[in-house]
Image: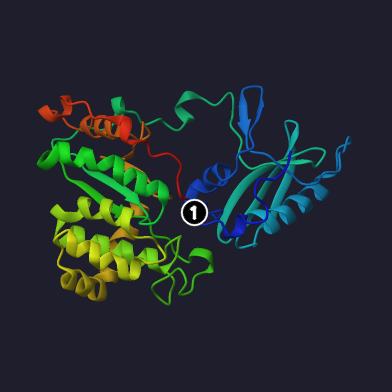
Amino acid sequence: MKKICPSWLKNCKCWEVFAKNSKFWKIFAMSFAGVLILGGIAFTVFEFTAVERISPITKEKAGEMAIKYINENLLQSGDAKLKSIEKDRGVYHIKFTSGENEYDSYVALDGNFIFPYGFELNAKEAEKEPVVTNANIEKRDNPEIHLYTMSYCPYGNQAEEVMAPVVKLLGSKVKIEPHYVIYSNYNGGGPTNCLDKENKYCSMHGIDELNQDIRELCIYKYQPEKYWDYVIAVNTKCSLADIKTCWSGVAKDNGINVAKITDCQKNEAISLLENEVALNEKYNVSGSPMLVINGSEFSGNRTPEGYKAGICSGFNSQPEECNTKLDDSAGTASGGCN
């Protein structure tokens, strides 16, 4: 099995291969397309070498090869260190550290494959992570809805376009808040991706994306009724390459006070980003797009009707508008920037 895009992995702008809380290997596994199906278990698999081995190698050799491969091919930081390796039910079970975090991985006994994520077939039902569906989303009188995106993640832009008709339909019956995915020390930090010298406020696609995130937060704060029309227009008319100058023309066309937004960006950026970081941490946000309904991540269809159904399921008493079926022909938000 060949590796997927090995030449550009460390610089991939839409797939972050770096540890972030407990979701590291989930993000990591999503970054590649190879799937091995064996006995009902799915693993993402990478081949160490094209040389076929028939006999098992020693656990010391397997550990050495795994850490070398992870550092050279999979981790941007390159700081993985082996903690332990033991034979476990037909594979070598590796524990390694990256920074202050510890992770598990598995290596085939002959050293040909690394399995970054495993599933326990006989896990007790209570130990399995619950799947959030419309049926088990918490219900409230006034649902809390957050849509997390990056202003220049193409999948986040799709999600905004999918959400726009939902916002229009539900109107004042529910507040659908836009929020943004903020990383710390992204890609090693620095002015290319981060706003501050401490590298606490960074964006995946660079500083121009982060500045646009801030402007959009300002628009939602001061002219929320203009936000969704503006975002759909700016996604269409401006690219990441020209957003620094293009954004203001689109803002004027949509009746937005450019001077007010410019002042907000200059004087309120840090406070706005602090709030985003706190929300990212609270809801374990790791990528764009992510829809959070009453504190739970929505996992249904990313279509206008899918989003509407998920949001409506969060009401104790659904408004009449929830009975209206939305047209899904406009598209589906698929994929993600992680």
Q: Report crowding for label 1: few under 14, some 14 to 19, many 20 or more residues within 10 A (C-alpha).
A: some
Q: Quadrant of the N terminus?
A: top right
Closest to the observer: 144 or 216? 216
The vertical placement of 129 against 216, above or below, is: above
Q: Report whether residue 201 is seen.
A: no
The vertical placement of 4 against 306, above or below, is: below
Closest to the observer: 244 or 166? 244
Q: Which residue appears at 17% of the width and 26% of the height?
A: 324
Q: Position of residue 202 (x, y in %)?
A: 42, 65
Q: Which residue appears at 37% of the width and 67% of the height?
A: 242
Q: Position of residue 50 (x, y in %)?
A: 82, 44
Q: Position of residue 208 (x, y in %)?
A: 39, 67
Q: Quadrant of residue 107?
A: top right
Q: Quadrant of residue 325?
A: top left
Question: Could you tell me which secondary element the residue under label 1 belongs to?
Answer: loop
Q: Is residue 199 left or right of residue 31?
A: left
Q: Which residue appears at 22% of the width and 50% of the height?
A: 228
Amino acid beneath label 1 = Lys
What coloring was used for the rendering? rainbow
**Residue at image mark 1:** 20
The vertical placement of 24 against 207, above or below, is: above
Give the residue furthest to the right: 55
Q: How many marks?
A: 1
Q: Report whether residue 28 is seen.
A: yes
Q: Position of residue 300 (x, y in %)?
A: 36, 31
Q: Is residue 130 left or right of residue 59?
A: left
